[in-house]
Amino acid sequence: MIQYHVSFDNPLTFYLQIQLTLDVPAEAPAPLALQLPAWRPGRYELQNFAQKIQKVVVTDAATGLSLPPRKTTKDRWEVADAAGKQLKVSYNFYAHQMDAGGSWLDASQLYLNPVQALLYVVGREDEECTLELALPDNWQIACGLPETSPHVLTAQNFDQLADSPLIASPTLEHFEYEAGGRRFHVWAQGEEAVLNWDILLADFQAFTEAQLKLFGSLPVKDYHFLNQFLPYKHYHGVEHANSTVIVLGPAELLMSDGLYKELLGVSCHELFHTWNIKSIRPAELQPYDYSRENYFRTCYIAEGITTYYGEYLLARSQVRTPDQYFEELNAVLRKHFDDAGGDNLSLADASMDLWLDGYRPGVPDRKVSVYHKGALAALLLDLTLRQLSGHARSLDDVMRRLYEEFGKTGVGYTEADYQRLVSEVAGRDMKRYFDQFIDGTAPLIEPLQNALRKVGCQLISSENVSASEGQFGFRTVLKNERTEVSYIWPNSPAAAALTVDDELIAVNGRRVTMNLQSLLSSGAAQYEVSVFRQNRLLTVTLAAQEGESFGPKYEVAKLAEADAAQRTGFARWLGWEF
């Protein structure tokens, strides 16, 4: 058994003291290798957690003699003379990252994501582990791991330990509800939140039961929502095997329409991950290799489908109305059509590129989001499957098949497996869908419009009312009272005259001072625009293209009039009468 011990001397420093104790067999190969994870499941990019490690010391427990470790990579250490000894590996970890993937220490709590902080013994990842926390007696622990003795958690292996975040505090709030014969725990830590727990637990139970009905069973014994409620604005959630960490703020607004909507959406999304990515896992992630990138081309399934269901199931479970669901769907549409990246990178390639720059804006129009386009591709597939089968089958059936064939068996699925299941559920070859919308960059507007009309809805397009973007194809941002160009649509008038980071000074001799809309709305055929470009003053000409507009906006709405088939389709899809 491998034992971890976590303590803290002074919370004001944010440093945790971590100790790893293990017996090394006499016949163990030399040297002993210790690895700190380089990334965490749920965020597919290298994160270099070793930046937070201070002063790694290895000693022989029997003699107290030092066994100096040799660092061989940025996050790997080797101990040469370890065979036959009991080792104590000690180091400090800087816990000063308050988000759903981080760790935090202060006088009021210890919040730990073990995947950030705990070294593992290479080759011994499957051994049972214990994590002992040196805490005051009155502190309670919220965690998906069992507490086998006071303040001691036990994991079957390192993977389970790494995937089990915890919050320890004397002020934790705890509530429970039951669904499908399983217990679901809702924990709250941080600022005192003004929550109506009766409403919250009823809503959580409703969307949980909808997910259980979809899949048929829960892949874990229980589930824990670990909530950090903050005094400032924040939004983040991360999935784990039988838990999630959700960080939201400001706490006093949690029952307001906007923030409560976010709490429901992220909670439903993260719970769906318990099946889709934690249980139903791509072959490339079976098992996780924490030391390097784990490339896979199917993150549009893991994140795109989950993004779709995370909001859709709130409507289907009657937690949200159709209009409220459409508001969330419209937000996804806005984000996807906010630039031209979808013309240049497929969803499958975007899944690979998460490891490159998937979580940052990156260079203009290079990439597409597996979350946003992935959700729209999932919507299109769901409606298509329903149309082909007269609503007898849907994306639900694909997800159930994935769970039965791969989630319950622990076998990772491949791209070919998913495509096969989709075609089998459809009752026809779905190669065209994958060629166009998954492996290709075909436009989504027309197929989405056709699919939505079958369920009594439509995709409404409206022109961008911004003069700078709608007529000329560029957006601006205000920086220190300066108006700078932040984005330019390809093949627009702005693309022939402006560049990103240009500072707009004047239009037709009139100074730009938060009045760009009016300056570009005179109806003139062209405008003389003065800009600072790399500290040089230039004047360029913007000429409108007659009949052309840029940055259109799209919204989903019910048809004003729908026939009987469309009304039936709406009810079968959303679970609400038209």
Image (cartoon, helix red, strand yellow):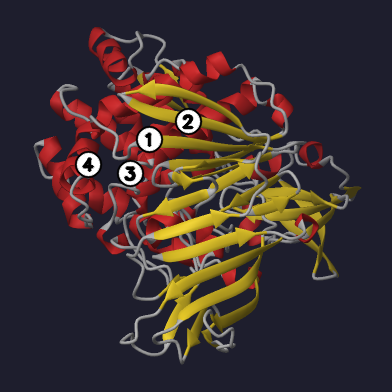
Locate the C terminus by quadrant. Answer: top left
Which residue is labeled 1 in the image?
Answer: 222
Q: Earlier in the sequence, mark 2 or mark 4?
A: 2
Does the image show residue 461?
no
Residue 553 lies in what quarter of the image? top right
Q: Are marks 3 and 1 in contact (CB under 8 Å)?
A: no
Q: Position of residue 79 (x, y in %)?
A: 48, 87
Residue at left offset 24%, top offset 50%: 434
Q: Position of residue 74 (x, y in %)?
A: 55, 80
Q: Amino acid at mark 4?
A: Tyr
Q: Amino acid at mark 3?
A: Asn
At mark 4, the secondary structure is: helix
Camera-side residue of 223 and 467: 223
From the viewer's perspective, tell me whether residue 103 is left or right of residue 237. Answer: right
At mark 1, the secondary structure is: strand
Which residue is labeled 2 in the image?
Answer: 185
Which residue is labeled 4 in the image?
Answer: 403
Q: Position of residue 406 (x, y in %)?
A: 20, 48
Q: Within 10 Å of the Cα at label 3, are there few (<14), some (14-19), or many (20+) other Cα atoms?
A: many
Q: Earlier in the sequence, mark 3 or mark 4?
A: 3
Q: Within 10 Å of the Cα at label 2, are there few (<14), some (14-19), or many (20+) other Cα atoms?
A: many
Per the model, the C-alpha gap separating discs 1 and 2 is: 8 Å
From the viewer's perspective, tell me whether residue 187 is left or right of residue 442. Answer: right
